[in-house]
Amino acid sequence: MARVISVHRQRDHQFSKSPEQQITLIAGEGVQGDAHRGQTVKHRSRVARDPDQPNLRQVHLLHEELLDELRTQSFRIHPGDIGENILTRDLALLDLPEGTLLRIGEQAKLRITGLRNPCRQLNDFAPGLTDAVLARGPQGELVRKAGVMAVVENGGVVKAGDAISTELPENGKPLEPV
């Protein structure tokens, strides 16, 4: 069964996020008390281009299986280190189509908007990490493994151990970076 392993937030614009007992999701905005919360984009590079664009990156979800993979490559990496708000287990996040709804815990509902595009800050955290979260698919296409981004459809409290269920869209498209 898909579940939440840990939750994180960070008030300031820092790369890593601090572990929390629980986080509160706010509909249309993101994680209460997190620097990326808001209806319009909060990532600094995107704000510089257009501060009025909608925030499609309110919540970052990452699969714990990626951390397992990175540890086999000798990376010392822990939950929250690469900026995720919600760390999951037993959920193939990267295989879900755009628009998938994730129901977490008793009330929270997220809609997946796209892939996290790995940035240079990964290498600042650990040299070689950017390359480690990228791969090539069967046709040579770039595969981004650094998790998915979502918007909050329905708010609620999320904590470790919460179950996650999925509702696939009728005509879901493959995920693209957002």
Image (cartoon, rainbow, N blue to C red):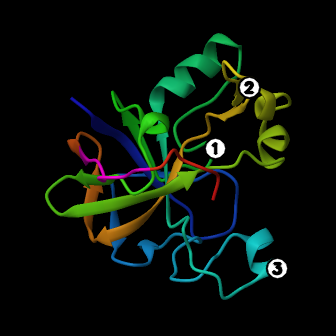
Inspect the magenta stretch and tell me whether residue 9 lies in it. no
Identify the image quadrant of the N terminus. Answer: top left
Query: Which residue carries the number 3 mark?
Result: 48
Rounded to the nearest angstrom, the CA distance separating label 2 from label 1 is 13 Å
Q: Give SS at disc 2.
A: helix
Q: Give SS at disc 3.
A: helix
Rounded to the nearest angstrom, the CA distance separating label 2 from label 3 is 28 Å
Query: Which residue carries the number 1 mark?
Result: 82
User: Relative to 163, is 73 on the left or the right?
Assistant: right
Outermost residue, front side: 171
Identify the amino acid type marked 1.
Answer: Ile
User: Relative to 134, is 97 on the left or the right?
Assistant: left
Residue 142 position, x and y percent, is 73, 33
Which of 72 and 93 lies nearest the eye of the viewer? 93
Inspect the magenta stretch and tell me whether residue 170 lies in it. yes
Q: Residue at x 47, y 49 (%)?
A: 173
Q: Main secondary structure of the magenta part?
A: loop
Q: Quadrant of residue 57?
A: bottom right
Query: Which residue carries the number 2 mark?
Result: 132
Q: Residue at x 31, y 70 (%)?
A: 153
Q: Residue at x 23, y 39 (%)?
A: 161
Residue 63 position, x and y percent, is 46, 34
Q: Quadrant of residue 145?
A: top right
Which of 110 and 26 lies nearest the eye of the viewer? 110
Rounded to the nearest angstrom, the CA distance separating label 1 from label 3 is 22 Å
Which of 41 and 122 lies nearest the eye of the viewer? 41
Q: Is residue 157 above or below residue 47?
A: above
Residue 28 position, x and y percent, is 40, 78
Magenta-drawn segment: 166-172
Identify the amino acid type marked 3.
Answer: Ala
Outermost residue, bottom side: 52
Q: Is residue 40 above or below residue 10?
A: below
